[in-house]
Image (cartoon, rainbow, N blue to C red):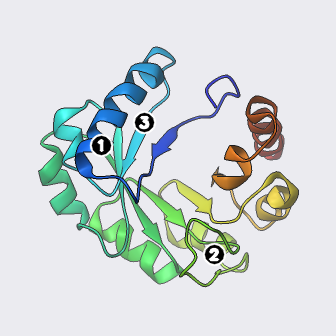
């Protein structure tokens, strides 16, 4: 992923224990740090007390932004998952540094969530003045559609991880995003 010029990497381990995630975050951070790529840890803000990751991401059912900041014990980027414009606006009021918005399409990483579609992306950028990462089922085959709907940033998971050539896949996705700027 780093060779493919991704802008950041999120460690998401829903099946791992916090101890396993701490160990994995430590190993990954050595790699991402050498390349000046921020590492964001999903769900567990307390990992940031042990490992100098650059950020933490919380969901709607996780800690609030203020609790997450308390748990990190230091100044750190904290993002929040949102599934509607109203939730995104609430996350902004709560003090999030960025928003995850989705799932845009059906995705195996969030099988219990109904896709929210493309309709609200433009409005979200009017109502929320934070960086917004559209997420959920985004792949190179639908990326242009997501960009046309107003997305400026995206998170790609399964499309990237299942690509036959991760480096080329990441570069091709980034090229589409940059071309739209």
Question: Mark on residue 39?
Answer: 3
Do labels 3 and 1 touch, CB within 8 Å?
no
**How far apart in space, not on screen, are marks 3 and 1 (Cα)?**
16 Å
Left or right: where 10 falls relative to 60: right
Q: 115 above or below 108?
A: below
Say which residue label 1 marks: 20
Q: Please identify the quadrant where the C terminus is shown.
A: top right
Whether 43 is drawn above or below 167: the answer is below
Which is more N-terminal, label 3 or label 2?
3
- Distance from the alpha carbon under mark 1 to that under mark 2: 39 Å
Label 1 secondary element: helix
Could you say where residue 105 lies in the image, as x and y percent from the top left? 70, 73
- Tell me if 149 is positioned left or right of 74 in this view: right
For the point 79% across and 38% down, the residue is 169
Residue at point 36%, 74% (across, down): 60
- Helix or strand or loop: what does disc 2 sit on? helix
Circle nearer the N terminus (3, 1): 1
Quadrant of the rendered image containing residue 150: bottom right
Q: Quadrant of residue 92?
A: bottom left
Q: Residues within 10 Å of mark 1 (few under 14, many from 20)?
A: few
The part of the image, by quadrant, that contains residue 73 is: top left
Q: Position of residue 101 (x, y in %)?
A: 55, 67
Label 2 belongs to which residue?
123
Q: Nearer the viewer, residue 177 or 33?
A: 33
The residue positioned 43% from the left and 79% from the top of the image is 87
């Amino acid at each position: 992923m780093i060779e493919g010029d991704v802008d950041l990497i999120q460690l998401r381990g829903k099946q791992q224990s916090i101890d396993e995630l701490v160990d994995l975050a430590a190993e990954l951070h050595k790699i991402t740090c050498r390349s000046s790529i921020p590492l964001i840890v999903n769900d567990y803000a307390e990992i940031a007390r042990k490992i100098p990751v650059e950020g933490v991401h919380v969901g709607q059912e996780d800690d609030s932004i203020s609790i997450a900041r308390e748990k990190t014990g230091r100044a750190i980027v904290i993002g929040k998952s949102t599934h509607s414009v109203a939730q995104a606006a609430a996350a902004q009021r709560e003090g999030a540094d960025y928003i995850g918005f989705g799932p845009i399409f059906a995705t195996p990483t969030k099988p219990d969530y109904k896709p929210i579609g493309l309709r609200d992306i433009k409005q979200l950028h009017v109502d929320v003045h934070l960086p917004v990462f559209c997420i959920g089922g985004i792949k190179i085959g639908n990326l242009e559609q997501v960009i046309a709907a107003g997305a400026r940033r995206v998170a790609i998971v399964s499309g990237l991880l299942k690509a036959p050539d991760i480096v080329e896949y990441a570069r091709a996705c980034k090229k589409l995003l940059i071309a739209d700027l």
